[in-house]
Amino acid sequence: MCWIATVDRSDDVDDTRLGIAPPQLDPAARQTPPRNAFRSATVAKLDLTDRSTILVAVDTQTDSRQRILTAARDLIHARSYTDVGVAEICAQAGVRKGSFYHYFPSKRDLTLAVLDLSLAEAKERLLDRAFDNRLPPLQRFDRLAELSYELQKERYDLTGRVLGCPVGNLATELATQDEPIRVATACAFARMQELIGGTLAAAVAAGELPEMDLAATAQAMVAYYEGVLMLAKTENDLEVIRRLLPSLRHIRVPKTTI
Amino acid sequence: MCWIATVDRSDDVDDTRLGIAPPQLDPAARQTPPRNAFRSATVAKLDLTDRSTILVAVDTQTDSRQRILTAARDLIHARSYTDVGVAEICAQAGVRKGSFYHYFPSKRDLTLAVLDLSLAEAKERLLDRAFDNRLPPLQRFDRLAELSYELQKERYDLTGRVLGCPVGNLATELATQDEPIRVATACAFARMQELIGGTLAAAVAAGELPEMDLAATAQAMVAYYEGVLMLAKTENDLEVIRRLLPSLRHIRVPKTTI
DNA sequence: CACGAAATTGACTGACCAGTCAACTAGTGG
DNA sequence: CCACTAGTTGACTGGTCAGTCAATTTCGTG
């Protein structure tokens, strides 16, 4: 669904990607915005040669789903899955319960979607930046430690608490009770392990690190990473991260010799 | 409250400590056991010179409190604090709700008592045995890894699940929401850190380990330990413990040089 | 026996839980 | 106008929650 509006050129409009192909835009469409329309605006610079305005394509799809997701992500991260109810999530998202169940069949499905969202965010803001191939292998661990500290600090500044790792928190709370969530969190850890394993392999190939059990060392690093965040959360002290996480680079599991 | 009974000497009676001082024992007390009395027996070897029996002092205090404690310990360890209700704990303990609140003012107070119980058990079955002064320092970490595996296996054989560390589980779930529990779990971690720190100091003094930041290394080891248990729980795989935990001995945080 | 203390019971309180679903609203196209 | 689709509402269902507390039972002592 699409709607077109003209926006004065002086408006501060962000030039973002167009979610809808130009042929579907109808310049003659009505100009009154539908309910909630401006929540998901995307901008299309079309023909500007004889216009003084920018045409804006507005995706009328509501953003209720997204609001539910982000509300759930924040509440569950700050507390726990079981402690945060659907009613509270709806209240924070500004929707009613029926809307919630329109978008998510169950609380668990919402939480699996929250996990996907958290992973996407961690990928963009943490993993891709830390494990950038342009960085020397060992420096990636330092980068990981720095970025992790910064992200935890961000939440701390908002909430007054060290919140720990959203994946680790959910795994710890639910692994014994909810198999799909256990599997999803285990997959998340496995992905992080792969990234670390790739870095370790590069470092060994470059002669920067000695031979070792790569898979086990990568997994041990994931364990250490999660453990440090757990301790920082328990102490409610960001300095625990700063003090302990840089030593991630020294974690080693030697090859087993029979 | 105390009651005395004579027990035939051939009975297999454990020689344990006496909770009640001898002058309070009345040899003429009646010999019929009160309700639930045998649940909390303590043994007193008194005057045996002209007797063929052992006198047993039986504490008549009911064991309802203890049953509530152990029920809560098992349920909360297997699931989570928020997910286990008071009603369910009472059902498993075989008491009614009023009894629960007779012994514990609140669910949180129960959980603090559960933490104390878990710590006492960990001290007896894990920490005192692993950190036995008769063991060479580095062997203590190996012993810690072995015993931890055995204890987790014990729960796994009963429940079909790797349950993780009860302290770490509670910390992760509740640190941001319940200050007394956060503090209690932080204290538990600090105690483990002290034991480890003492072992590290001994190893450094014996020339078995190089200089390092002792406090940070001990804390890093606690983090690694907890992280490994979390991963094993997430994977629901005891072998994760076997593969990763022995490397605990290699964790190092060097002294910071300015 | 009587009495006081300890222990137990369980109905009750006010609140919250995940999920259901008929009714309604909004938008689009014919 | 109507039909259809997408989205929203919120009362309802059957259940659970932590905690309260008067009544009852049990225990120990004199």
Image (cartoon, coloured by chain):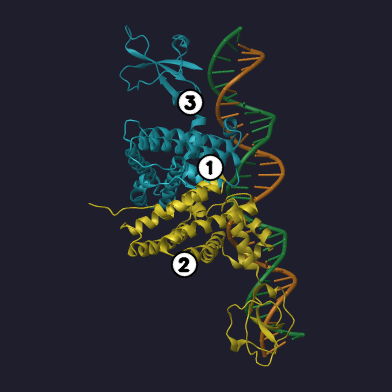
Chain colours: A cyan, B yellow, C green, D orange
Marks 2 and 3 share the same chain? no
> What amino acid is labelled 1 in the image?
Glu
Q: Position of residue A187 (x, y in %)?
A: 52, 37
Q: From this viewpoint, which residue is outermost toward the bottom?
A: B50
User: Image check: B140 left or right of A144?
Assistant: right
Q: Name the residue under label 2.
A: B132
Q: Where is residue B104 in the image (x, y as percent from the top left)?
A: 58, 65
Q: From this viewpoint, which residue is outermost toward the left?
A: B258
**Is residue A68 depicted above or below B25 in this figure?**
above
Disc 2 crowd rating (10 Å Cα; few below 14, some 14-19, many 20+) is some
User: Image check: B73 left or right of A23?
Assistant: right
- The answer to whether residue A19 of the structure is visible from this angle is yes
Q: Position of residue D7 (x, y in %)?
A: 55, 26
Q: Name the residue under label 1.
A: A88
What element does badge 3 sit on? loop
User: Image check: B111 left or right of D30?
Assistant: left
Disc 1 crowd rating (10 Å Cα; few below 14, some 14-19, many 20+) is some
**Is residue B231 depicted above or below B61 in this figure?**
above
Q: Mark 3 points at which residue?
A: A36
